[in-house]
Structure formats: structure tokens, C-alpha cells
């Protein structure tokens, strides 16, 4: 889960004017997001410390199936008058993982000379763009632009997002249910409390290695799994393998 007090303490103790990287939704690798009330408290501390929010938005619409809900934190910070950056990826929610497609947004504050500020920022971004990647891949960006600017295609894309995110949510519910039915030692509510593609299972490194050796189930050593890798055909096998390793290790 989220150590919210620890998070707030770290943000509070960071040097004034720090850039704070925040995941908009479906935190990677934990799958643990702040609630809307917690986001409001984060915003208050960020304001007090004059911190600059930098949002990483890689899973919009892919977490809950609702584009607006998944973007809530970003939009709230904008409404609060923050200047901020948003790195938005279309890798997952458009299925463009190999195309490096996305958007970079820089939101400036309201001011009499806002147009000049925008010009200066655009100039710096142009320099960075040229020195970093020069000419970005266009194929994926054109696909995203086509869908985003066509009402019918946009609606179809939203439906696809609901299908994909819904399947992952169903797998979370099924996994928790099966582990609880098996009476697997421990509590498993965190599986459904988390959201998005990834989940920290709570398994330790010794258990992970035993799973790999005995059941050929693979995950990172810290117990993180990709929920998208579970389906109706392998979830029973996975749950029983986890149950066995938890009891024995």
C-alpha cells in the first residue's frame, strides 16, 4: 500500500523549489495510487514548498477505463494554478509500444506576459528536441492523431480502453478470490486495492525464486507481476502455485 505519511514527509523535506515526479495514475511499479483527497493534500504541500510538479502519464484510460478519472490529479493541479509538465505516453493505451508516441505538455501560469513566456519555453523545448532526438518517429504519432481527432474513432478507442482495463480489473478480482478460497496465508485485499497493469504481490525474493524453479512462473524478484499476463486459462495454475510457495516458504 501507500505510506502516505512517509510520502508527505519526503515532499515536505525536499529543498524548496524541487521538481517532484508524480505518476498521474496506475503507479508503476506498485499499482498504488493516492486517493483524490490525498492528491489535494499533496497539492497543498507542493504549493507551500514551491515545488514544481512533473507528471508521468503513461496509462491514462488504461487504469480505470475512464480517461477523465485517470487524469483527475493532473487536471486538479492545473485548476489549482500550478505551472507543471506532463510527459504523456501512448505506448500502452494506443498499443504503440514500439513507436515511442506521446505528448509533452508544459502548462504555464496566468500572467500579463504569458505569450512571451510560452515563446521562451517553446524555444527551449525546440533546442532540447533537436539535441535529444532531432526527428521523432512519425508513424505512431500519426495513428494517435488520427484517432484523437476523429469523433467516431475516439469513441471506439474509449470502448477498447474500457475492455482492456476491465479485463485486468476482472483478473485482479479473480486472483484475490482464488487465493482467499484456497486459504492462502496472509491478506490479499491489496490485489484489488491496487490498479493498472502492475501489482506488488507481497511475495519475497525467496518465494519468487521458488515459484520460478518449481512452477515456471516468472516475475521480478521484488514480487511485482504484470496483471495483464493473467487470463482465464492460467489464473488457477498461478493461484495454486502462489498458495503452495507461500505455505512452504
Image (cartoon, rainbow, N blue to C red):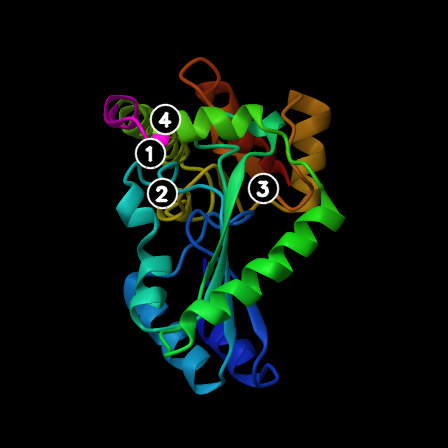
Looking at the image, can residue 94 be seen?
Answer: no
Q: Which residues are magenta?
A: 148-155
- Contact, CB < 8 Å: mark 1 with mark 2? yes
Q: Nearer the viewer, mark 4 or mark 2?
A: 4
- Contact, CB < 8 Å: mark 4 with mark 2? no
Q: Nearer the viewer, mark 1 or mark 4?
A: 4
Does 206 sit left or right of 224 as displayed?
right
Dot 4 or dot 2: first in sequence order is 4
Q: Nearer the viewer, residue 11 or 141?
A: 141
Which mark is on residue 192? 2
Which quadrant: the C terminus? top right
Q: Residue at x 51, y 19 (%)?
A: 237
Looking at the image, can residue 147 be seen?
Answer: yes
Cα distance between the residues tagged 3 and 2: 14 Å
Q: Residue at x 39, y 30 (%)?
A: 168
Magenta region includes residue 153: yes
Dot 4 or dot 3: first in sequence order is 4
Q: Residue at x 63, y 30 (%)?
A: 137
Which mark is on residue 147? 4
Magenta region includes residue 7: no
Cα distance between the residues tagged 4 and 3: 32 Å
Does 65 sit left or right of 131 as displayed?
left
Bin the neighbour count of mark 4 within 10 Å (Cα to Cα): few under 14, some 14-19, many 20 and up: some
Residue 20: image location, x then y, percent: 55, 69
Look at the numbered disc 4 and give the secondary structure of its residue: helix
Bin the neighbour count of mark 2 within 10 Å (Cα to Cα): few under 14, some 14-19, many 20 and up: some
Which mark is on residue 173? 1
Does 136 sit left or right of 78 as displayed?
right
The secondary structure making up most of the magenta span is helix
Amino acid at each position: 500500500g501507500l505510506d502516505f505519511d512517509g510520502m508527505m514527509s519526503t515532499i515536505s523535506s525536499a529543498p524548496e523549489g524541487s521538481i517532484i515526479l508524480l505518476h498521474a495514475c496506475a503507479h508503476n511499479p506498485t499499482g498504488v495510487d493516492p486517493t483524490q483527497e490525498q492528491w489535494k493534500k499533496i497539492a497543498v504541500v507542493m504549493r507551500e514548498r514551491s515545488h514544481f510538479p512533473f507528471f508521468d502519464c503513461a496509462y491514462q484510460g488504461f487504469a480505470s477505463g475512464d480517461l477523465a478519472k485517470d487524469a483527475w490529479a493532473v487536471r486538479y493541479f492545473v485548476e489549482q494554478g500550478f505551472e507543471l509538465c506532463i510527459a504523456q505516453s501512448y505506448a500502452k493505451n494506443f498499443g504503440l509500444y514500439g513507436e515511442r508516441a506521446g505528448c509533452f505538455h508544459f502548462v504555464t501560469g496566468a500572467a500579463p506576459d504569458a505569450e512571451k513566456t510560452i515563446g521562451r519555453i517553446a524555444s527551449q523545448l525546440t533546442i532540447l528536441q533537436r539535441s535529444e532526438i532531432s526527428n521523432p518517429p512519425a508513424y505512431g504519432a500519426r495513428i494517435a492523431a488520427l484517432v484523437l481527432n476523429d469523433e467516431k474513432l475516439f469513441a471506439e478507442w474509449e470502448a477498447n480502453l474500457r475492455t482492456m482495463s476491465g479485463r485486468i480489473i476482472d483478473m485482479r478480482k479473480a486472483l484475490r478470490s482464488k487465493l482467499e478460497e484456497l486459504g492462502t496465508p496472509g491478506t490479499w485485499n491489496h490485489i484489488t486495492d491496487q490498479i493498472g497493469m502492475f501489482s506488488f504481490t507481497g511475495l519475497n525474493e525467496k518465494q519468487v525464486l521458488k515459484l520460478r524453479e518449481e512452477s515456471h512462473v516468472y516475475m521480478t524478484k521484488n514480487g511485482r507481476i504484470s496483471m495483464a499476463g493473467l487470463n482465464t486459462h492460467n489464473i488457477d495454475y498461478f493461484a495454486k502455485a502462489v498458495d503452495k510457495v507461500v505455505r512452504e516458504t
